[in-house]
Each structure stands twice: as structure tokens, then as C-alpha cells.
Amino acid sequence: WPLRNKIKFTMEGQIGDLEVEKHVQYILSVEKRKDNFESVVMEHLRMNGAYWGLTTLDLLGKLDMVDEDEIISWVMECQHESGGFGGNVGHDPHILYTLSAVQVLALFDKLNVLDIDKVSNYIAGLQNEDGSFSGDMWGEIDTRFSYIAICSLSLLQRLDKINVEKAVNYIVSCKNLDGGFGCTPGAESHAGQIFCCVSALALTGSLHHVDKDLLGWWLCERQVKSGALNGRPEKLPDVCYSWWVLSSLIMIDRAHWIDKEKLIKFILDCQDKENGGISDRPDDAVDVFHTYFGVAGLAHLEYPGLKAVDPAYALPVDVVNRIFFSR
Ligand code: GRG
Ligand code: ZN
């Protein structure tokens, strides 16, 4: 996924600094805190929080600051007898948390602790007759779940457990006239869903279903005057779209259609320079989700000192390479 135009980081004063140490401390403190508002809200999606926080630490080169054994045994405690993972110990399994669990294990090179067939059978069991995927036993269908199923099974090297052709056809049925994708057939294009559909198509070698110029045009139109990106026309910009939009543009080779320097400046402006963390917009409250997407967005923009991140697997490139090239 080569980026075409490199950015110069030498113009002092033009591009501020990434507060690496402060962000590391912020993530470590969120992991530990149990009594504040964010940790109460995060209780049921702690597995996603662990993925966001730990991947950020890895991109910053600081994954060794956490207790790996403690994390791995907590992740495995969240596994349900069905093979799927819950958001926390004792919670119901959902495909959303199952991908995060697989990604966290991948970060630590610990996929071998999994009963791979059990996890992949749980995921494959969520595929419907029309090729779509439900998120859990209750049946909600969304192209987010198609991506999650394909990404997880690809990381586990078990894509053969599902009907890939039908999965791809379902995603293509969610394509709109503007070149984008929605959560179900006929639903409006949204950058988050476009990320899911483009990644799923990339991971299955099916990107020929995307009109790259048409979609690239829609995606680069997401950049507003401040340099930030929004998720659909007329909506407010938000740091997380630096991930959803930019990853999609990279996968279709159109990342050079946006102004990268302006986007870097916007992400850096969303930092809490005192206490660490990144927010959705300047001066809003920070959270782990936007801290991850801010740092991962900067990694896509080749900000110095950050590991490269894979736009489809949403993991550091060295982690992905270790899975596919070292065995
Ligand atoms: C491994 C990176 C990774 C993801 C897992 C959960 C998931 C797969 C993908 C989610 C894709 C998605 C739909 C992202 C959008 C998230 C978001 C900011 C939603 C807000 O929606 P609105 O309607 O926001 O409140 P707008 O910006 O449209 O006003
Ligand atoms: Zn956001």
C-alpha cells in the first residue's frame, strides 16, 4: 500500500509534536482505572478497548510497558464455550469482541494459545444464506460483521470455512451509485462502512468490484477546510475518519488525493497536550478509541517514529508479516 507523496517534517512550527510519552501514560492509566466515567462506559466493551489501547502502544513502540501474561489470560477468560469472545469476563460472545481478541493475541504473537477451529467455527456459524454475517446469535446483519468475519478468519488462516463468493456478493449488493457502501443493501454510504467493505474486498482479492476513481472522489471530498475528514457529506469532521477514510483511500491507491499535511495538523491539534490522549475534535474530551485512530492515522501519514499499520487488518505491518511470512 505505497503512499505516493512523502511529507516533510522539517518545517518547525508548521507541524506540532506528537506527545508520545503522554499518550503512553494515558493509555496505561485507562487500563488501570476502574472508577471513572470512561471505564464504566467501557466495562462491556473492554475487549475493544484493549485492542485500541494495545495497538496504539505497539505503533508507538511501547507494547513492552504492559504485563503480557496478565492480558493473555484475561483475553482467554473472556472466551465463551461457543468459541466466540465476550467484551469482558462472563459477557455474551459477539463477533466484534472476537476480532479484537484475535487481534490482541496477534499483537503478542500468541495466536497459538487458541483452539483455532473452535473460534473459526463460531465465526463461520454466523454466515447467513445470502452470504451476509450476523454479529451474534440475535441476528443483526451489517457489513461491519462481514469485514470482521473475513478479517478474523484471514488472520486465523481459515477463510475456507465460509462461502467467500457469497460473502463478496453480499458486500457488492451494498454498493451505492456514489461508489460507496452502506451497512445493508440500499443503506446510505458512510466512511466507516466503506472501510469495512473495501477491506473485506481487499482481503478476499476482490477489489475489482470497486470503482476506484468514483469511490476515491467521494472519499477525498470528505476533507473539509480545516484539513479534517468527515464520515459523510455535511457531517462534522472527526479524528476517527482519519482511519476509516485514509485506510480506504490507501487500499484503492488514491491516498494522494487528500492534503496530508493539513490532516496531520488537525490530528495533532486534537491531542490533550497536558494529560495525554486524543479526542474527536480539538478541545473535546479524549478517549482510547480516538487516541488509537489518531495515532494510526498519523502512521498512515508516515509521521516519524511510528510503526507502519496495515489498512485492512488494522494491525502493525510487522505483526501481519509475522503471521503470514514467518511460519
Ligand atoms: C478493527 C478498525 C477495526 C474495526 C472493526 C467495528 C468495525 C470493525 C467497524 C466500524 C465501522 C464504522 C461504522 C465506523 C463509524 C464509527 C462512527 C464514528 C460512527 C458515528 O456515526 P454517526 O452517524 O456519525 O454518529 P457521523 O460522523 O456520520 O455524524
Ligand atoms: Zn469518531
Image (spheres, rainbow, N blue to C red):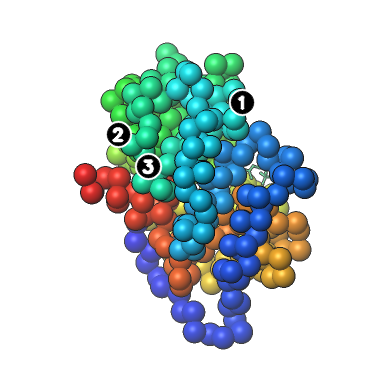
On the image, numbered disc 3 is attached to which residue?
A: 110
Residue position marked by numbered label 2 in the rendering: 157
Write down which quadrant ligand 1 falls in.
Answer: top right
Which comes before the other along the chain, label 3 or label 2? 3
Task: Name which residue lies at 66% across and 50% down.
Answer: 32
Quarter of the C terminus within the rendering: top left
Q: Is residue 74 placed above or below 136 in the rendered structure?
A: below
**Residue bearing mark 1:** 91
Identified by mark 1, the residue type is His
**Mark 2 residue type:** Gln
* Nearest to the observer: residue 131 or residue 36: 36
Measure how far apart labels 1 and 3 are at the Cα level.
Answer: 22 Å
Q: Return the residue nearer the eye: 121 or 264.
A: 121
Q: Residue at x 43, y 30 (%)?
A: 149
Marks 1 and 3 close (CB-CB < 8 Å)? no
Q: Position of residue 190 (x, y in %)?
A: 58, 41
Query: Residue 92, percent across and down?
Result: 59, 23
Mark 3 vs mark 2: in front: 3
| Location of residue 9 in the rendering, given as x and y in whole percent from the top left corner | 49, 79
Asked if 95 appears above or below 230 in the picture, the reply is above
Q: Residue 74 vs residue 224: left or right?
A: left
Within-10-Å neighbours for mark 2: few <14, some 14–19, many 20+: some
N-terminal-most mark, 1 or 3: 1
Amino acid type of the residue that numbered disc 3 sits on in the rendered structure: Lys
Q: Quadrant of residue 17?
A: bottom right
Residue displayed at 51% across by 22% down: 80
Q: In which quarter of the view is residue 261 placed?
A: bottom right
* Dot 3 alpha-carbon crowd within 10 angstroms: few under 14, some 14 to 19, many 20 or more: some
Q: Quadrant of residue 137?
A: top right
